[in-house]
Amino acid sequence: MLEHESISNPTHSKTTGLPRKRFYRARAHSNPLSDSHFPVPISPSQFDLTLHYPHYFPCPDKSDGSKKIEFADIGCGFGGLLISLSTLFPDKLMIGMELRDKVTEYVKERILALRTSNPGQYENVSVVRTNSMKYIPNYFEKGQLTKMFFLFPDPHFKEKNHRRRVISPHLLDEYAYVLRVGGIIYTITDVEELGEWMKSCLDGHPLFEAVSEDELVADLVVKLLSTATEEGQKVERNDGQTFRAVYRRIGSCVPH
């Protein structure tokens, strides 16, 4: 819930008003197959947007449905990509989905602080604590999203744990369901084997095709994949490699 709160507390910087990460640190990854306890809407129509976007939905139960979330950052971490996208696409509603409770709380506080210090901005971005590997269809309708982001996901190196990976043939079926035709999936990792895995899964799925290199060069979002997040900045500082896969949702071929 993104309600206005006083930010004059020791967990926030006195100069910027932004939350300090050291008070919100958590394990780098969580087990997505374990049971966690947090509220989950029973259907997309039950997902209360007034709690997340009060500027657009000031009154509960009075949304006309004309404005919907279009971008989803899966495993959004500390929210770096979301914050960058918010000003790049000010007319698009976007949400981060994060399993770790402390990290989710940090992103909430960060957005609130930015809204306070930049009136009229960052009203289009929010975050929710949830398990996107289990509950994506509870939040989004068929064909609702235009962009999905999977940046530096947990590699789950052991073969027995590959079923925990956030990109898999089974989960791509769900992502294809909530992405509209023409929508884009963006993935990036610094683990070569995982990069090959994600690319292989996407190549093998009948509802996705690789975006051409010319289109990637023209896409303003692509550069943010490696620069906007804490993980990406760390890789860049260490002169590491990244492995990117960007795919478009295509229509199904129905035989005549």
Image: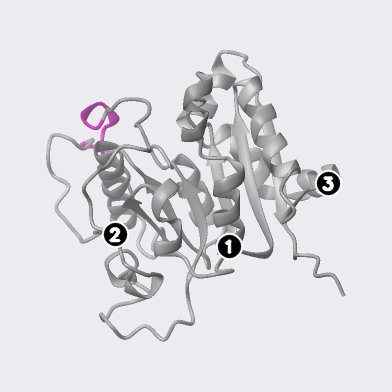
Q: Amino acid at mark 3?
A: Ser
- The Cα atoms of the two marked residues, 2 and 3, are separated by 37 Å
Q: Determine contact: label 1, label 3, CB under 8 Å.
A: no
Q: Which stretch did the figure color magenta?
A: 14-24
- Residue wearing tag 3: 212
Secondary structure beneath label 3: loop
Provide the residue designation for mark 2. 40
Relative vertical location of residue 93 with respect to residue 74 in this rendering, above or below? below
Q: Secondary structure at mark 1?
A: helix
Image quadrant of residue 255? bottom right
> What residue do we see at 52% from left, 65% from top?
92
- Name the foreground residue: 132 vs 117: 132
As displayed, is residue 71 above or below residue 150? below
Which is more toward the observer, 138 or 82? 138
Say the numbered circle drawn on residue 177. Answer: 1
Q: In 3D space, how far apart are the residues under numbered discs 2 and 1 (Cα atoms)? A: 19 Å
For this orientation, the residue located farthest to the front is 256
Tell me which label, 1 or 3, sits earlier in the chain: 1
